[in-house]
Image: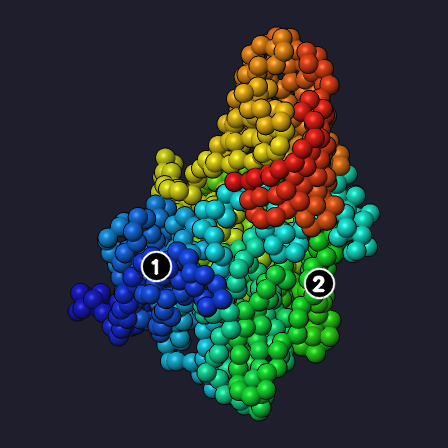
């Protein structure tokens, strides 16, 4: 009898295991040429089962997912992460950290139970593949099915699309090329500051040595809803629809707004929340929101997803008849940072409105996410007897070199945070940058806290941290193994803004396998000019802190290339911060009475973004220099340089540059040694 009782214990505690249904899917990842519509040329894309986004995977709580992922790519390994789902550690899908990468021509089978309902998604965690199309949606219904009184249920996957390869996007961001800002009409200039009435702000920014601010990094060619710029949902007039929005963008926040009236939020990052109404909803990368919309009796009504920087939008259309577009959202003021700082401060000190009507009336034109108003449908309070520990994490970054980090260190420098099973971790985020960051924790939900310490604080797996803002979350360490935590802006994660929460039970000598996540790759850069009288420029192999470069200064007269005066530097520059670098190298020259020599020195940025340098060489000569570039209009810049060498004495130049394309500009320059001329400048 005793043995019989022991055998029946699992039946009482795990009755779902007796009736769990296996739900199976096959996902085939392949490479093809693809375009969202006929207006854009087709480019290399990565698809799942031939589509972007991939298919929606549907389950019920208690099901067991069996998902076979087939790698049919031409040259790359791949991976799939089940974003937001609580799965066994080995099934999380992060290559090397938790799950082996899926090699060429192979199949990996994932199998895990579905423990909780909601809207989730899946995507590649290999390199920059997510940007190229490897993402799709997941819907997990409650065990008894959805009971809410809605007529339709639609999944809307939002994403951003660019015609360039993601690797070229990454290289562009590291190089400091301003083309994306120009393409988005967000580039800052003297003329633009005057038009905006912000010339004083423009001058103050330059004085403080801060680069021009932008809301987002990349200029996209399209924003998509379910793979289209305009998606027609099969929703009839008069119906109430549950729209399950998923932001699968690589680096785009979206504002959601409906022409049919306020959006009713009923779920956030999967779990249900007490319904609230919002006019506009800011959705960070990797967040999901379920909203209810009732379509008016007549007309075709738009729910618009507008990129946060105002550079474009995707549309979801409901109903039929005369079109009713959603209101446009004002573009941000990039010249005055006070607006962005004030938004974060107001969010910290938010007074919660007593009603939806009051909240709608008080909502700003460009609101932050409504975390302060979100409430779970039941208590989420953690066991008070558990030990607690606070972990401060400052979000740090450097747009000059595109380095992103926590506490000033990238994942390659400090990649592990050790935690103990059974403790409660309180993560205190402080954003020291002027960008939004969507922070995602694998394998756990966290409680979004504020000063009120609410029992029904909402549960999320991803949270937006606004510029110069603060947020606090807490979670119970109730898993095992290694779990990735990172900024879900793809290019920020790729350049170091990530950590691994590693459970100490794995032993004091355990070190997670980061795979590609702690790499610091080198990129080739080149920029210079070819003019009628001279050529100057630099080519380098560059990673986050190092430049191995060649710099040239060639001069001639009347295209007489047989008598070219040259000075060529071969060097290594070590970058410490936006204002300070060191340099060491060799200088080759055929100048009059000059000899080849070694040199070393420092580079320092002065107020008003004036670049300076000081060098001393092996012949005992000292060289000092200053340089400054100033953008007058969106396309036109003026620049100047002056230097003094104790051997060759004074040299200076000044000129104008007119932007044509990402790679080329027209240039005219006067140089004290080579005279005046003009030609083309280039950037690669």
Q: In the rendering, which numbered label is found on residue 309? A: none
Look at mark 1 in the image and give the residue it sits on. Answer: 32
Q: Examine the rendering and report whether any part of residue 1 can be seen.
A: yes
Tell me residue 366's x, y (percent): 68, 64
Taking depth in this image into account, of 77 and 346 the one nearest to the observer is 77
Taking depth in this image into account, of 224 and 645 the one nearest to the observer is 645
Q: Quadrant of the N terminus?
A: bottom left
Tell me residue 181's x, y (percent): 62, 51
Graded by Cα atoms within 10 Å as few (under 14), some (14 to 19) or many (20 or more), the crowding at tag 1 reads: some
Q: Is residue 459 above or below residue 672?
A: below
**Distance Cα–Cα, label 2 vs label 1:** 48 Å
SS at badge 1: strand
Q: Residue at x 46, y 77 (%)?
A: 154
Graded by Cα atoms within 10 Å as few (under 14), some (14 to 19) or many (20 or more), the crowding at tag 2 reads: few
Q: Is residue 266 above or below residue 2?
A: below
Instruction: Give the image quarter of residue 357.
Output: bottom right
Is 489 on the left or on the right of 261, as rendered?
left
Look at mark 2 in the image and give the residue it sits on. Answer: 350
Tell me residue 449's x, y (percent): 60, 59
């Amino acid at each position: 009898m005793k043995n019989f009782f022991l055998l029946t214990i699992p039946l009482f505690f795990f009755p779902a295991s007796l009736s769990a249904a296996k739900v199976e899917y096959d996902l085939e990842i392949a490479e093809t040429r693809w375009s969202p519509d006929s207006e854009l040329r087709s480019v290399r894309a990565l698809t799942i089962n031939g589509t972007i986004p991939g298919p929606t995977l549907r389950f019920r709580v208690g099901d067991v997912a069996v998902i076979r992922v087939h790698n049919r790519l031409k040259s790359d390994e791949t991976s799939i992460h089940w974003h937001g789902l609580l799965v066994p550690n080995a099934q999380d899908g992060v290559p090397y950290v938790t799950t082996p990468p899926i090699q060429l021509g192979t199949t990996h089978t994932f199998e895990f139970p579905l423990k909780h309902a909601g809207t989730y998604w899946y995507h590649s965690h290999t390199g920059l593949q997510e940007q190229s199309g490897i993402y799709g949606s997941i819907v997990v219904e409650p065990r008894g099915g959805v009971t809410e009184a809605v007529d339709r249920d639609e999944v809307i996957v939002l994403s951003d699309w660019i015609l360039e390869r993601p690797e070229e996007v990454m290289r562009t961001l590291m190089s400091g090329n301003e083309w994306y800002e120009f393409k988005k009409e967000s580039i800052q200039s003297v003329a633009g500051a005057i038009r905006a009435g912000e010339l004083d702000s423009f001058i103050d920014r330059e004085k403080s040595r801060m680069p021009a601010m932008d809301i987002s990094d990349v200029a996209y060619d399209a924003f998509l809803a379910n793979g289209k710029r305009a998606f027609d949902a099969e929703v009839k007039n008069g119906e109430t629809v549950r729209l399950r929005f998923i932001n699968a963008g690589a680096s785009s926040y979206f504002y959601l707004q409906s022409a049919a009236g306020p959006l009713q939020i009923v779920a956030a990052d999967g779990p249900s929340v007490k319904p609230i109404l919002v006019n506009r909803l800011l959705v960070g990368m990797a967040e999901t929101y379920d909203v209810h919309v009732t379509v008016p009796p007549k007309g075709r009504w738009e729910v618009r997803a507008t990129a946060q920087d105002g550079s474009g939008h995707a549309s979801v259309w409901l109903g039929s008849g005369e079109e009713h577009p959603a209101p446009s959202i004002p573009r941000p003021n990039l010249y005055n940072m006070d607006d962005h700082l004030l938004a974060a401060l107001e969010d910290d000190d938010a007074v919660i409105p007593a009603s939806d009507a009051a909240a709608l009336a008080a909502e700003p034109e460009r609101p932050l996410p409504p975390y302060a108003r979100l409430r779970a449908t039941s208590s989420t309070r953690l066991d008070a007897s558990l030990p607690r520990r606070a972990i401060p994490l400052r979000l740090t970054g450097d747009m000059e070199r595109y380095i992103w980090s926590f506490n000033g260190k990238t994942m390659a420098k400090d990649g592990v945070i050790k935690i103990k099973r059974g403790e409660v971790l309180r993560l205190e985020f402080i954003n020291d940058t002027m960008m939004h960051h969507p922070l995602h924790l694998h394998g756990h939900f966290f409680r979004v806290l504020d000063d009120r310490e609410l029992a029904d604080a909402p549960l999320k797996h991803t949270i937006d941290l606004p510029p110069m803002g603060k947020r606090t979350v807490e979670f119970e360490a109730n898993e095992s193994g290694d779990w990735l935590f990172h900024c879900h802006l793809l290019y920020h994660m790729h350049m170091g803004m990530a950590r691994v929460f590693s459970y100490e039970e794995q032993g004091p000598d355990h070190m997670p396998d980061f795979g590609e996540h702690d790499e610091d790759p080198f990129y080739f850069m080149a920029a210079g000019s070819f003019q009628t009288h001279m050529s100057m420029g630099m080519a380098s192999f560059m990673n986050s802190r190092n430049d191995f470069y060649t710099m040239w200064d060639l001069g001639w007269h009347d295209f007489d290339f047989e008598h070219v005066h040259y000075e060529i530097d071969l060097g290594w520059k070590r970058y410490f911060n936006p204002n300070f670098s060191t340099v060491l190298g060799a200088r080759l020259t055929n100048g009059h009475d000059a000899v080849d020599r070694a040199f070393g020195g420092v580079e320092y940025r002065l107020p008003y973004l004036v670049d300076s340098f000081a060098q001393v060489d092996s012949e005992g000569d000292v060289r000092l220099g200053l340089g400054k570039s100033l953008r007058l209009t969106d396309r036109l810049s003026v620049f100047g340089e002056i230097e003094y060498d104790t051997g060759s004495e004074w040299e200076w130049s000044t000129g104008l540059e007119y932007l044509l394309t990402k790679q080329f500009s027209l240039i005219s320059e006067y140089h004290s040694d080579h005279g005046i001329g003009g030609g083309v400048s280039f950037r690669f």
